[in-house]
Amino acid sequence: MRKIKDGLPLHVIPNPAEALSHGRVTSPSDGPWMQHPCIMTVGRLVPFKRQDLLMESFSTLSEVYHLVIFREGPERARLIKKAEDLKIANRVWLLGQVLNPREQFAFARACLVSSDFEGFPNVLLEMMSVNWAVVSTICADGIDQLPGIFTCFTGNSTQLAMAIQNALDMSDTDREIRFRQMKDHLSEKTYG
């Protein structure tokens, strides 16, 4: 969408909730990781995204869960080593690029943002548009004010593990309430 202000074009970031309403979420690709309840995240494999911290948090959760990380980056080898050191390598999947991660998020048990800082993680909005169990570090202004998501401070694996566990332990009623809060919030916003 383009608008004109003072003779100059403005670019508006589309609302991910609106984009979702124009298409269907289809089932994710059938990989071996889909045989298990998954916790998912997406982000370039770089230090400030803190997939290492996420792995530390994940290692304290039940062994029934698998961690799926989408995207590539220079930290891949270090993250593989980290998973091996934590003895969770058989439950961590570094799946690289995916065309539309939102389609995958709909089938996750929980979706996460673990970054130390972000401008504003648009992927968080995509997660909120399709999943009721969304966890994020407070890596940007306003995240702690988003309704329905579980938050924790950055850089603390214990707090992140507790937020993830709280998201996984929600009752069906709480899931419905939180998801409705997220959907209502997204439908009211235009980001741009």
Image (cartoon, rainbow, N blue to C red):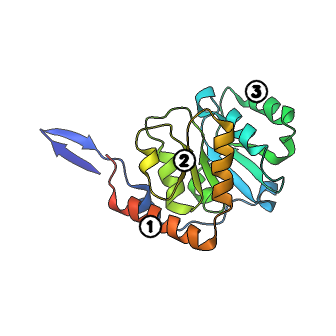
Q: Nearer the viewer, residue 63 or 16?
A: 63
Q: How many marks?
A: 3
Q: Is residue 76 left or right of residue 9?
A: right
Provide the secondary structure element on which disc 3 rests: helix
Q: Amino acid at mark 3?
A: Arg
Separation of residues labelled 3 and 2 (CA atoms) = 26 Å
* Residue 175 on image: x %, y %: 58, 67
Name the residue rendered at 64%, 69% in the picture.
Answer: 171
Q: Look at mark 1 in the image and give the residue it sits on.
A: 21
Q: Look at mark 3 in the image and give the residue it sits on.
A: 78
Name the residue rendered at 33%, 61% in the picture.
Answer: 188
Q: Amino acid at mark 2?
A: Thr
Which image quadrant for residue 76?
top right
Asked if one can make out residue 61 in the rendered structure from this viewpoint, the answer is yes
Q: Earlier in the sequence, mark 3 or mark 1?
A: 1
Choose mark 3 or mark 2, whichever is in front: 2
Q: Amino acid at mark 1?
A: Ser
Q: Nearer the viewer, residue 139 or 5?
A: 139
Q: Earlier in the sequence, mark 3 or mark 2?
A: 3
